[in-house]
Amino acid sequence: MQKGLSVSDSDGSTFAPLVVLELAPNTKEEAVEWLLKRIRDKQQDGGAELLVEKLSPEDQSTEKDNPNVYMVGASMRRLLFGAEDVGLFKEFNDGTMRSFTCANRHNFKEFQGDGDSFLSMAECQYIIKHELDTLRAKGEAHVPGYPKMKLYPGKSVIRRIQSKGILVQIFPLHENEELKRLSFSWYKQFKLSFQPLDDIRHYFGEGLALYFAFLEYFTFALIPMAIIGIPYYLFDWEDYDKYTVFAGFNLVWCTVILELWKRLSASLAYRWGTLSRKKAFEEPRPGFHGILGFNPVTGREEPLYPNFKRQLRIYLVSVPFVLLCLYLSLYVMMIYFEMEGWVLMIHDEEPTFWTGVLLFIPSVIYAVVIEIMNLIYRYAAEYLTNWENHRLESTFQNHLVLKVLVFNFFNCFASLFYIAFVMQDMGLLRQSLATLLITSQILNQIMEAFLPYWLQRRRNKKAHRRVIKTLADKELPLSDQVKLEADMSTYLGTFDDYLELFLLFGYVSLFSCVYPLAAVLVVLNNVTEMYSDALKMCKVFKRPFSEPAADVGVWQLAFEAMSVIAVVTNCALIGMSPQVKSYFPESDTQLIMWVVAGEHLLLAVKFILTFVIPDIPKNIQIKLSRLEFESLEALKKRRQTQGRKCWRARAPQKRISDDERRGQPFRY
Amino acid sequence: MQKGLSVSDSDGSTFAPLVVLELAPNTKEEAVEWLLKRIRDKQQDGGAELLVEKLSPEDQSTEKDNPNVYMVGASMRRLLFGAEDVGLFKEFNDGTMRSFTCANRHNFKEFQGDGDSFLSMAECQYIIKHELDTLRAKGEAHVPGYPKMKLYPGKSVIRRIQSKGILVQIFPLHENEELKRLSFSWYKQFKLSFQPLDDIRHYFGEGLALYFAFLEYFTFALIPMAIIGIPYYLFDWEDYDKYTVFAGFNLVWCTVILELWKRLSASLAYRWGTLSRKKAFEEPRPGFHGILGFNPVTGREEPLYPNFKRQLRIYLVSVPFVLLCLYLSLYVMMIYFEMEGWVLMIHDEEPTFWTGVLLFIPSVIYAVVIEIMNLIYRYAAEYLTNWENHRLESTFQNHLVLKVLVFNFFNCFASLFYIAFVMQDMGLLRQSLATLLITSQILNQIMEAFLPYWLQRRRNKKAHRRVIKTLADKELPLSDQVKLEADMSTYLGTFDDYLELFLLFGYVSLFSCVYPLAAVLVVLNNVTEMYSDALKMCKVFKRPFSEPAADVGVWQLAFEAMSVIAVVTNCALIGMSPQVKSYFPESDTQLIMWVVAGEHLLLAVKFILTFVIPDIPKNIQIKLSRLEFESLEALKKRRQTQGRKCWRARAPQKRISDDERRGQPFRY
């Protein structure tokens, strides 16, 4: 728990603020009162039983600040119940990870005394978020004061006021002490060290920790490819054997690292208690709308939206839109090639230093345009997927990821494919690949970390100056900290970070046999990426709610799909190289046959490797089976005693009829 | 329950015999007594609490009959407890399938009165098998009377005496009335009708019913291919477009039917209550041996066998052996081709009717040899997999299936691949395919059903004549029925049946564009196969214990792998056909490129289809989620009340400390 920060409750007791609720400044008084009452109400009465208090009015230094900012906390007892509700896994006395239960609390390893430091602040905040999210309307027909904001029994109150704009934002508070410690071990020491994954998980939750684990793993996994790639680049080896060997190694290596990642992520998820955590039933996402009906699963009243309408929207609008965007991207690509040709012409006419520089300009411009198009498309895809009106956040995410992936893949790699397979110009391919890779890396890091960081710093400084001119380096009072954090940008999840890695993986794997240096560049990029991502998490963004995650989800599939495509492209590239062609001087047919055979062989090897390497390490598999076995045994025992008990209650008649009803005994 | 058959218990009451235990005739008296006592003992005392009685001595008509035959049954109450133990799913009052519990028994749909007809006989027998299997040694160091047959606490008694040969066989009894009814609706009516799947499941269990469902589904699924194939055969269409269209249709069709089968099998498994049934912890298989240690999962004492030793056996012995067998099969294939050439030569020298017949001889001989080799290899693979000493029956089965599949695939299709891609003789391919297909079908049906049936009938007749010369068509007394059934062959599971379908699927899909009639032949074969399989289950074999199954398991994967290989072979065949070649007169390269592109496209379509078609139908998905949701809610409720209760017990101090420990309240 954060020391020194507390808020006094309405009945005088104090509590540590964990989560900030910011309501719209013009929210009607009665709605606010109703909301606070519902949050404070006992659970028996359908409330969330949390502590909530307004950020004291005297803290509001200026008039223009939003007065409707509320701090939410909870008693330790309430948090522990909540931990049970969300199905948190904690380390048990015997070293296994088990679902926390209050009844069993003293058997958990880190539970001491009253369990004060048992839950990390991130966990507390996650619990509060969950409890707020599951705070449901009872009999209210609408939000008090807003007759148009309909409610129905069972509707999540928070989601409704969020989708209607009353709730401006909800975010967890940073812990300054913890953050300082974390950022020191994370990026302030200028030495090579492993990512402090457990600390990251402790502060930001499993989802983000898994991203950083993946980033680190991916970087290490590329090092062998980078090391092998360097001599190829330096000595310009272009022999047939070495080429093929390098590409073959790369392709198998890609499969192996993806498989091993599954094992590593399973280990991490086990250690963090998310591997076997059961998912709660998913609520409709905030923006979901439809006609009120009964959910066939829960039997609760909630909006329903017919599936065929969604399918129609997907196939009649979204798919054509994506295709249109792809066409547009193709069009831009053709413009790039025209520019390229035009610049080349100029350079050929009078080659000077400046025309030499000019040669790179089209690629750089194209790289910038690609980034901009990706950005615009990203928003369009989000809008469109939102409009498709998916019921669950997870299906929404899947559809969004699919749309964005297809477009980004096409947008980033179409020109390279064109150069490689239509123009067949390996020199240009190498040059374009390098320019695209380097430009997009630089742009990305600026856009994503340094620019926001710089903006943030400027804003911070202003705020500092304004509020506390004297206490320069001391701790800020709560109200100021809340205000500072409320102004920070919101971290939108790991989507963009994974997407970036996905594209980098594409640059490395798709054309690895043409440009072996790509792996080196990506490794270098990833090292700085780690620092800039850490910086942005600690300094630029609001603290995100922790997101329990057991794996990288749909990204595993995306990376695997990329590695399959890489097999095809690399085999084709090898088949087209003049060195290989010279081995089959008399017939192209034979060459192609060999290449196709090799490709099929590689694909088969990939497939077999996927099967042979188990997804979960043996020792974790054993631990999981042990838990499952124990719960099965316990269930069996409980059932037996229960069953026997309730049978005995009416046993006497039964006993007799049991023997009697066998019909006529038939002796022989 | 079977009427008219009963056995009197030691304390005079009678029970319906369900399962027969046959011990070796020379088993020592003390071992028998010990075993019977353990089976009869109360569960509290570690027994199985079943009823067991010797088949009355006066029934032993001749001296040479085995006197050590025991009948096992159980009281209805015991069976219901057992049903709970094995986690049987039954239909609940609200129409969903739920795990049966005794406490809740009156809420199950078919539970009336004492639950007399609630469990089918197959279920009762399965329960008894399970209870016998989990009858564990307590303090015994060895089987009484046999100091060498070591036991340790927790070892399954039945598995030990089975692996040591004391227990000769254990099998469930047939129900004659039920069987008559089933066989009438199944195969005695000579009209086309659907398989009586629910009745089959009721009598033989889910595993076998799923096989027949698959057989039926597969047959129906091939009908469109057969119908489209007929005109191709009749009118000798060999146009490029039609060919490609047919092959393309076939390949996509194969994927679609395999995906739809998953949905159908999920529906069936849901209806039969096996879809969400939890697997119990798997015991070591009977033949498994090793050094006594502690199982890391259960903590029980049991033999352990180091994994690396098993890996060594697999990679140093099994893999080379399989390769050797493949080489042998290749060698036989070359002999076949030599024979073929020799016969062709004879025919060419003086073509008469007899040399014309002679032309078919090598193919027929080769087909017979293939079947024989498959049979021998089957035994070798079983021996070898047994020797690899897998702990679990399921891993044993997987390794066995893999070995047998690879060899059978190679053995059956190698010659066809050779003809297609090395000799490139499409006429010969067609002829060989037809000969192989027809011969192996005929051989299979004879070997698998009619021969055993004929042997069985002869044996039955002898037995009838000997025992009851007068009661010709009346019901047999129990002892004679037991004797008759004990002499029947044992059904070894669905392995061979699925294997046969797998190979047929190969004949249809691998070369479908060359021999469109294959689908017609396979459809015809499957129709007779249904009859002969039904006949063999009802008349030839002992009743098998029912095997709960939710899907066809590893076979789904095998069929899918075959359909992937089929894409490759069909594309290659199309690429090689002269009609297609004539479209690219100037360059082979372009032709191959197109074919390869088409192949990749088809593979991508397959892959996408697999993703797009959900494995479980929507309505079943909803039912499953509803159950899961309900159990989650119930768990939450129980936990909340439990947790609160045990918290309250020590609440007073807590309440105060909760508020106090927040450190110095800090006001601002």
Image (tube, coloured by chain):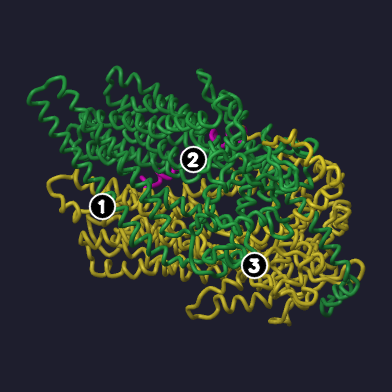
Chain colours: A yellow, B green
Please determine whether, in this image, residue A251 is positioned above or below residue A96.
above
Specify the subunit that label 2 lies on: B
Residue B348 inside the magenta-drawn segment: no
Q: Residue at x 60, y 51 (%)?
A: B279
Tell me the CA gap for discs 3 and 2.
35 Å
Q: Which residue is mark 3?
A: B139
Q: Magenta region: which residues?
A: A309-335
**Which amino acid type is marked by label 1?**
Asp
User: Which residue occupies the foreground of this view, B120 or A235?
Assistant: B120
- Drawn side of residue A58 relative to residue B270, left or right: right
Mark 1–mark 2 CB contact (< 8 Å)? no
What label does residue B491 carry, if any?
2
Please give the residue where the numbered disc 1 appears in the rendered image.
Answer: A425
- Mark 3 or 2: in front is 3
- Of residues B145 and A466, the one nearer the viewer is B145
In this rendering, the label closer to the viewer, 1 or 2 = 2
Q: For the point 59% across and 25% down, which residue is it?
A: B471
